[in-house]
Amino acid sequence: MNHDTYPDAYIRGILNTVKTIAMVGFSPKESRPSYFVFKYLIERGYRVFPVNPGHAGKEVLGHKVYASLSDVPEPIDMVDIFRASEHVLAVVQEALTLAPKPQVIWMQLTVRNDEAAKLAEDNGIKVVMNRCPKIEYGRLSTEISWIGVNSRTLSSRRPQTLGKGVQRMSLKESSD
């Protein structure tokens, strides 16, 4: 697979299929990107397991933090990696010891490890590198356009079609 670009159907297929996500490198600090993504994915209905040995046993937003992937108490569909590229191979190697193996290894923005990607793909696991599931979900569900991104129109006025709270859009391809 070419890891420089991904077809929308590939990303959409992953985000529509996975239900459980282990977030390796999660930070409980509210200002960290991993915290934003963690909260966003939970709000979209995913079961997210934060993984960080330095915070193991703590609870964040009602979710227990785990020390390692093998400590997560249920099967993991996707491993979302918030670690530097040089640490990814070890995460993939640990993921391969799980039974069942995850369906997807997802490396966050700026994270790329071709050796780890090849190892995962050789073991039947889909790989995404240098992407954020929060951004991809927002883009593919059109949530991101609610705030004027890519619409060529910016406004401080709230769209009239939105209700109260977080509206969840579908990742299904439109039939237009």
Image (tube, rainbow, N blue to C red):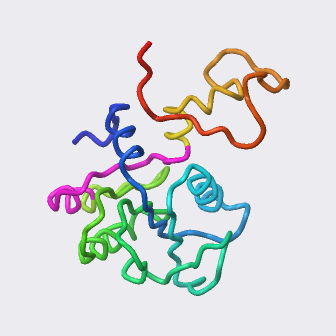
Up/down of 6 relative to 100, above or below: above
Up/down of 67 relative to 88, above or below: below
Whether 124 is among the magenta residues is: yes
Instruction: Tell me if 29 is positioned left or right of 138 in this view.
Output: right
Whether 14 is among the magenta residues is: no
Position of residue 69 measured from the top left corner of the image (x, y, whole percent): 39, 77
Highlighted range, magenta: 117-134
Position of residue 145 measured from the top left corner of the image (x, y, whole percent): 63, 26
Q: Residue lying farthest left?
A: 122
Position of residue 85 measured from the top left corner of the image (x, y, whole percent): 41, 62
User: Residue sitting at 77 percent across and 23 percent down?
Assistant: 159
Q: For the C terminus, which image quadrant?
A: top left
Up/down of 41 relative to 50, above or below: above
User: Residue sitting at 65 percent across and 56 percent down?
Assistant: 36
Instruction: Tell me if 68 is positioned left or right of 40 in this view.
Output: left
Q: Residue lying farthest right?
A: 157
Q: Quadrant of residue 175?
A: top left
Question: Camera-side residue: 30 or 170?
Answer: 170
Instruction: Tell me if 69 is positioned left or right of 141 in this view.
Output: left
User: Residue sitting at 38 percent across and 50 percent down?
Assistant: 129
So how many labels did they put on this image? 0
Q: Residue lying farthest front?
A: 163
